Every structure is written in C-alpha cells, then in structure tokens.
Amino acid sequence: MSSTATSRSLAAQPSERFMRTPNLAEPDTQRLRATLRQYFLETFDRYESIFQCLASDEAYYVKPIALRHPLIFYFGHTATFFVNKLLLTRLIDQRLDQHLESVFAVGVDEMSWDDLDDAHYEWPSVAEVQAYRDRVRALVCDLIDHAPLTSPIDWQNPWWAIIMGVEHERIHIETSSVLIRQHALKYVRPAAGWEPRGDTQAAAPDNALVRVPAGAVQVGKAYNDPQYGWDNEYGSHTAQVESFQASRYLVSNQEFLAFVEAGGYRNHRDWTEEGQQWLAYSHAEHPTFWIKKTQGWYLRLMTGEIPMPWAWPVEVNYLEAKAFCNWKAAETGQPVRLPTEDEWYRLYDTAGLKDPGDEPCNANLHLDHGASSCPVNLYQQGDCFDVVGNVWQWTETPTYPFNGFDVHPIYDDFTTPTFDGRHNLMKGGSWISCGNEAVRASRYAFRRHFFQHAGLRYVVSHAPAEAPAAYYETDKLMSEYAEFHYGDTYFGVDNFSQALARHALAALGDRPRRRALDLGCASGRATFELAKAFEHVTGVDFSARFINQGVQLIQTGQLRYTLTDEGDLVSYKARSLRDLGLKDTIARVEFYQGDACNLKPQFTGYDLVLAANLIDRLYDPARFLDDIHTRVVQGGLLIIASPYTWLEEHTPRQAWVGGFKKDAENYTTLDGLKDHLGPHFRLLSGPTDVPFVIRETRRKFQHTLSEMTIWERL
C-alpha cells in the first residue's frame, strides 16, 4: 500500500455499535447539537474507514465496473454533497473548492447496462481529496457547534441539509462496499472493522411456507415526523392485503443452486424479456458473486473469496430473482412470485418488529454483527427469519410516490427520476444498511439489473402483484397541458376548464343534467368539472396521450408531471382529484379516444356538448358542425369556445370555416358557425371572451382569449 494511501486519516476505528438515526425533535438544543455532532463524525469516520479496504492508490482510479465512476469519485462525492446542499440552505455562503465541488457533484445511475460512460476525467490525488474531506469535516463541525439552531429540525429547517448529508453518506457506505466487492482482488485488502463473519460452514435449512394473515397496511411519514426521511417516504398509502404464504427463510445459496443446476441461466423460459436481454449482454451462468473453481463453488466477499457458505442468502439482481420464482412456480405448480411492497409491510407488521434501538438488534443489520451476510436461520422475527437484515429483498413493486408526495427543494431529483416503472423497490436492508436505510419507512429502489447486497424471499399468492402508477409525465406538451388543466392559476386568470363548466351550468338553467360530452377533452379537467353536476360525462379526444392523463386520474386519483423552469431545469408537480374537490366524480366519468369529425354512433343523446379549443384544430370542421346536432337532444346545449387560431398544419386552408375574405368582406369564424349551425341551433348566448394562460417556462406564458358561444338545439 502506498504512502499516500496510508497517510490519509484513518479516523477512529469503528465503534461496536453504529449510532442510529437521531430524534430531530429533541427540545434541548445543546443536547441536540451534541447528538448531531456525534452522528456526523461517526458517519464521516466510518465512511473513510471503508476505503482502507483499497490496497493502493491505483485502486481508486480503476473502475470496479464500467457502469460507475472509479472509487476516487465516491471518496470525494459525499463531502462535496454537504457543501452543495449547505449552500442551497444558506448555512454557508461560499464554496470550499469550486473545482472539486464540480468534479464530484453528480454520480452515475445504472440506468442501462449498455449505456457506458466513457468520458475522461482528470481526477485529483487521494491526498488532495483527503485534505478536502478534512476541510469539510471542520466546516460541518463548526456549523453544528455554532450555527443558530431551533428545534425541531424538519425539512423546512436549514439544518435539514446537515442531516441529509449524513444520511446520504450512510447510503454511500453501502454502495461503496458493493463497488469494493466488485473490484479485482489485487485492488482490495482486509481492513480492521470490515472483517466478514466466520459462520460459513453451517448447513442450509430446508425452506418452508408461513401463512401471513390478511390485513391492512398503512405507511407514509408525516411531515412533522421527528426522524429524518427521504422525500418518497412522506405522504400516505393504505392497502388491504390478501392472505398469502411467505418463505420462512431468505433463499439460501443452497436453495438457489437447484435453479443453477437445472440450467436456469441457459433455459430462457423463466426469464422476462428484460431478463433475457440482460443475459445476452452479461453472459451470466450463475449469480455474479459466485465463483466456480476446480475445488468447488466459492463466494466473493468485499475483500476476499471463501468456500461457498451454502446457508448464507443468495445475492442476485431482480431479473435473476424473478427468473428463480418463475422456475419454482413451474416446478411446484404454485403461484410463486416475489412479494409486493405492501406484502413486505404486512410481513413486517405481523412479525411485531420495531425500528433498531440503541442496543444491537435481533437482525444482521446496521453493522451490528459483522461485515457480511450470515446463515439465513439465525435471526428469527415472528414466524420468519430475516424479515429485516442480512440482505435486501427484491419486491415486485416499481417505486411510486405516496399520496401527498412532495420533493425537497434542495434535492428535487433524489426520487423522481426513478418514477419510470423501471426501478423496483428493495425492502428490509442488509448487514451494512444503517441510519435511515434500516427503518421501516425507508424506500429504496434500483434498476432491475442492479447489484446490491440483495437477495429474495418468495411468496405464494393468487393475488396479482399490482402496483400504483409511478408515471411522471415529462413530455413538454403533455406537461404543459397537465398544468393548464390541473395546475396553478397565473396572473389572476381563472382555470379555463372550470370557467367553461361554470358558464355551461349557468346556461343550462333548469334543463336536464343527465349526460354530457366533452369533445376535445385533452387532459380532462372539464370532464371532471361537469361531472359534479351531471349524472354521466364522457371525455373524447383524438390523442391517446391526452386521454391517458384522464384515465390515470380515474385509476389513481393523481397526476404527476414535470414543468420546464429554464433550460434543463425542471419542477416536479403532482395534483390529485381529492385536492381539487373532484374525487367524488370518478364514478361518473369515462374517457375514449375518438375523432370529433367522425364520432362513433354510441356518442349521442347528450344534454350538453362542450367543444373547447377544438374547432380550429379539426381537419374538417364543417363536417363536425353540420353533424353535431345528431349528438344533442332537443333543447340541449352546444358550447363552442375557440381562439380561432387557424393554421394549415391542422386544417387545410380550404376547410377553414372563417378567418378569410368572402365576397370581398371579412368572414369571421362566428359567421361560419352561424351558417353551419343555423339550421339546427339558435345562438343562446355570446360571443363571450374567456381568457386562459398556458405556462411554457417559469418566465414565459401564453395569454389567450377564447371566444365562447352557447347554442340551443332546436
């Protein structure tokens, strides 16, 4: 080992018990300062100590895997994170090292196994990074000792950035341990405090199924919770979970061996399409940490290889775990699969577990019992073993936001990029999971090909593994319309859909309010607004993408989207029907994709038809106007609103129904409406200008007047 590597701060050797995540509502601010100082220093020291497992300076600069930065990045990253977040909360007003804080700012998400980052980096020396870390240590200690402090520390408190930095570093203790485990053996060495357990020769138990009774699950942190949490933990989620059976033990290396020996990696029958793609890329024939030698199977740990501990849990990615379950289902004839997140919570609750306390817990968790996995039958929790600890457990649930989810303003992209249906939740934590990672409320999700200290427990259940929608709309046009329909109001201009619905209901008077049709409904706000007064409302739009937003609201009650602020910067928004006072309308609303110029026969018999901002987007508006009377009951109303922005990209010039010269005179769209609708309608009201505002960026808006006319069917 080089003199540079040995000269860095070795910090204190890890204590026997790693400090738990603290109570941030401690009213005694001096005691709170002392607690946070200890929490910060223990974490900072423990993080530096794991780099003692690197055998040389060279080990810092060679990538353990092609998909991630070399370890020198992670050595500096967690320290620069403190500075970057402290600046945002104005606890500090200047940087320590602008260059390093840029180099180490952003890591790499394993978004794809074939999306390699080959950029060239001029990394600083290990000694330079250690010197920088020493400066950050002094800075944070000085803040903890002297910065103004009020209790409690909630996520509006600037001190939240300090706790966020500590918890972020604890996450990287674990992720760095995985990278060290993936490093070539010549780059690693044993280190004090990071010795693996010695119980490697125990016999693996035969697995069995345990019945978990049906029951309710309730999760989600309150925003005044006294313990730190990441944004995806806040809000609320409730579910009724059907009874299921769960494996008593995590799947051991011994149990997984049967899948390997049955040709599980060669027979693609049991693999998902994504799993087959990963197999083609990786050429995997067995779990990645297994090593086949002439004398038998071995297991790669952080700093060495040992004869296979068959009783320890197997460690695989989601794709392998899913294939194993599919294989087991085929072998047993039972509906074997991975648990959902809700089922894991049900298992946790029935086991009577509590978050780790001050004493070492009855789980291989929080670094309480050594620096490796252990046999799967050591730590019993209820009727099962290792409900928490030993290794993370993959679930069938792609991560999603709870009701009431919000992003933290100084870390708005911690979770939201994972709301894409491709990041699955892992539960329970591993032997090295600590701080927030070790509590019931924690929610961590990774790409399905990602390797962590993760394995699996399987369940047997006929219930489908359904997950709430995780979709966040990022398409600019779709997001602008989501905000236009369901978002904020700007410059004092009322929500356009709400305004049209008010006009419609006022014009209806005592007329029947049985069925309404919202033609060109786009994202569907007016459809829901009309349903507050009508027995049934149908929204129809030509675009399936728009319809999807309305359908999503019916299915989940929520819509999530990103808005452009400036350049590549975005804001994350979420709207719920409950918050908008529209939740009770769901049963009276339906959405269909359809062509307003060629509607299906079923769309008829309406007391009201609303066509908002539609007429000047149709390819044949005359046909629509000439036929629409067949859709409206006698005495019913037709409302047309439009800014009359005729464009040839939407409507051929010869098909415009106004906005041109006719017989040398101006012929407006209102003239055209009167000519086409006159045989079957009378103009009841208007024209009336109804304004609306569309947000394009934080500083650019469209302000438009839509001309509304109301027609009564003769």
Image (cartoon, rainbow, N blue to C red):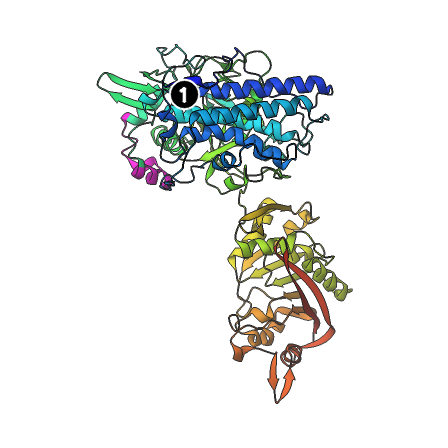
Query: Dot 1: few (<14), some (14–19), or many (≥20) neighbours within 10 Å?
Result: some
Residue 659, located in which quarter of the rendered image? bottom right
Residue depicted at x 44% and y 26%: 176
**Where is mark 1, residue-wise?**
4
Amino acid type at image mark 1:
Thr
Residue 556, located in which quarter of the rendered image? top right
User: Could you tell me if residue 213 is visible in this image?
Assistant: no
The answer to whether residue 620 is magenta is no
Residue 285, located in which quarter of the rendered image? top left
Q: Which residues are magenta?
A: 261-281
Given residues 194 and 678, the one toward you in this image is: 194
Q: Quadrant of the N terminus?
A: top left
> In the image as oriented, which residue stretches furthest toward the left?
294
The local secondary structure at tag 1 comes to: helix
The answer to whether residue 263 is magenta is yes
Given residues 70 and 254, the one toward you in this image is: 70
Q: For the stretch drawn in magenta, what is the main secondary structure?
A: helix
Q: Is residue 330 left or right of residue 459?
A: left
Q: Position of residue 166 (x, y in %)?
A: 57, 25
Q: Position of residue 131 (x, y in %)?
A: 50, 24
Residue depicted at x 67% and y 59%: 497
Residue depicted at x 64% and y 46%: 576
How many numbered marks appear? 1
Q: Position of residue 27 (x, y in %)?
A: 74, 21
Q: Is residue 336 left or right of residue 569?
A: left
Given residues 411 and 690, the one toward you in this image is: 411
User: Could you tell me if residue 161 is visible in this image?
Assistant: yes
Vertical side of 73 occupied by 570: above or below: below
Q: Position of residue 612 (x, y in %)?
A: 64, 65
Q: Quadrant of the C terminus?
A: bottom right
